[in-house]
Image: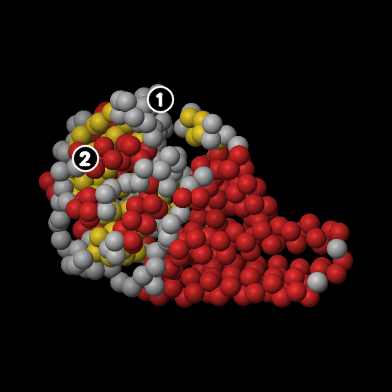
Amino acid sequence: MICSIEISLLIILLLYVSSLSSVIVGWIQIKKKPLISEVTHQNISIVIAVRNEGDRIKACLTSVINQNYDKSNFELILIDDHSTDGTIQIAEKAIENTSLNFTIVKLKDKYSKKEALKKGVKYAQHPIIALTDGDCILPPNWLSIISNHLKNEVSMLLGPVIFSDGQGFLGTFQFLDMCAVQGVTFGLAYYHQPVLNNGANLAYLKETYHQVNGYDNYNTPSGDDIFLLEKFKSHRKKVVGIMDEQFIVKTYSERSWSSFINQRLRWASKTGYYKDVFLIFVSSIIFIQNLIVFFIYLGMLFVEEIRFIGIILIISKWLIDFILLFLLSSYFKQRDRLLYFIPVQLVYPIYIVTVAVASKFYKFKWKDRIFNE
């Protein structure tokens, strides 16, 4: 009985290590691809859905205003999802005396980021939609890179996102988790099999958006970006990832454990709606491997026979994880975060399992709204 269990565990470990090894190779290769230097000035609509971003929206809009891009070639569409903290008043003051072409729209009868994005695309006047969030800082050449690469049958462009703040264990936990997500995102994009993207740095053709019938109708508080990616893939549209330092969008980590858990419960709530077979496979392997480690923790306390194989499995997982996180944290020039590698690895399986289970049963709060009621 023990032998058969050990064989099963080794098979899962082999699949996990093989998958992450492919991700690592893909990420290394896509990172080597140079940016297209040819300068084009396609017309672009920046769409930003906001709710209660009063303390961060000014910095975001400043990064929009400071784009190295002719302002006659882009517009900003800001959609307010019922903010209660003066977000729109701050935004209006930040951009009212600039030459920026902007439109501010307020949701009335509908709620959610997805509905705000739908309205934003509806108001967009240009053929390219560029998305970010109200708490993000854009690099100066963001629009130029989008314009240079979103052509030649490319229908969607994925860009990197990383946390620019957050210290201590909580901040580092979020940073290393985001590094892993970025590794998977761009590592698999290299093989033309993207499974993840991030609405904080995303661009696509409006024409293709309409061809795939726009955003999904799932009743989820997140996932608008991933489900749109699934639609683009199912219609065989070309999706490209750009991993370059000039294209990194910076955002903020959560400041407390409660807000962090609520954020991750929101993210996890969409997993039951995945349709992309490759995404389901990758996410399942990652979850199962962490679930196994979780049970190894429990088993090592009570079953002496599995302690040796348990230690081997944990060390093997840590090794491949460390390689990925070392490469990504080095790329983002924050290698010192790896000082927290062991405590993060110890906690991560517990976090994964807890959030996955809790997202199915517990209410969670986000932007003053309660979900899973």
Which quarter of the figure is the N terminus placed in? Answer: bottom right
Q: Position of residue 205 (x, y in %)?
A: 22, 54
Give the quadrant of residue 31.
Answer: bottom left
Q: Work out whether residue 42 or residue 121 is closer to the camera in this orientation and state it.
A: 121
- Between residue 195 and residue 342, name the one nearer to us: 195
Label 2 and label 1: CA atoms lie apart by 26 Å
Residue 332 appears in view: no
For residue 270, side relative to residue 314 (left or right)? left
Q: Is residue 359 above or below residue 287?
A: above
Quadrant of the rendering where the C terminus is positioned: top right
Q: Is residue 120 left or right of residue 11?
A: left
Q: Amino acid at mark 1?
A: Asp
Crowding at mark 1 (Cα within 10 Å: few <14, some 14-19, many 20+):
few
- Tell me which label, 2 or 1, sits earlier in the chain: 1
Q: Which residue is mark 2?
A: 122
Residue 204: horizontal and vertical position, in percent?
26, 54
What residue is drawn where x is 43% and y is 57%?
Answer: 275
Q: Horizontally, is 322 left or right of 27 in the view?
A: right
Total numbered labels: 2
The residue at 60%/59% (across/down) is 287
Colouring style: secondary structure
Q: Quadrant of residue 10?
A: bottom right
Proximity of marks 2 and 1: CB atoms separated by less than 8 Å: no
Q: Secondary structure at mark 1?
A: loop
Q: Which residue is mark 1?
A: 85
Is residue 140 visible to us here? Answer: yes
Q: Secondary structure at mark 2?
A: helix
Determine the residue located farthest toward the left in the rendered image.
72
- Taking the spot 46% from the left edge, 54% from the top edge, the residue there is 274
* Residue type for callout 2: Lys
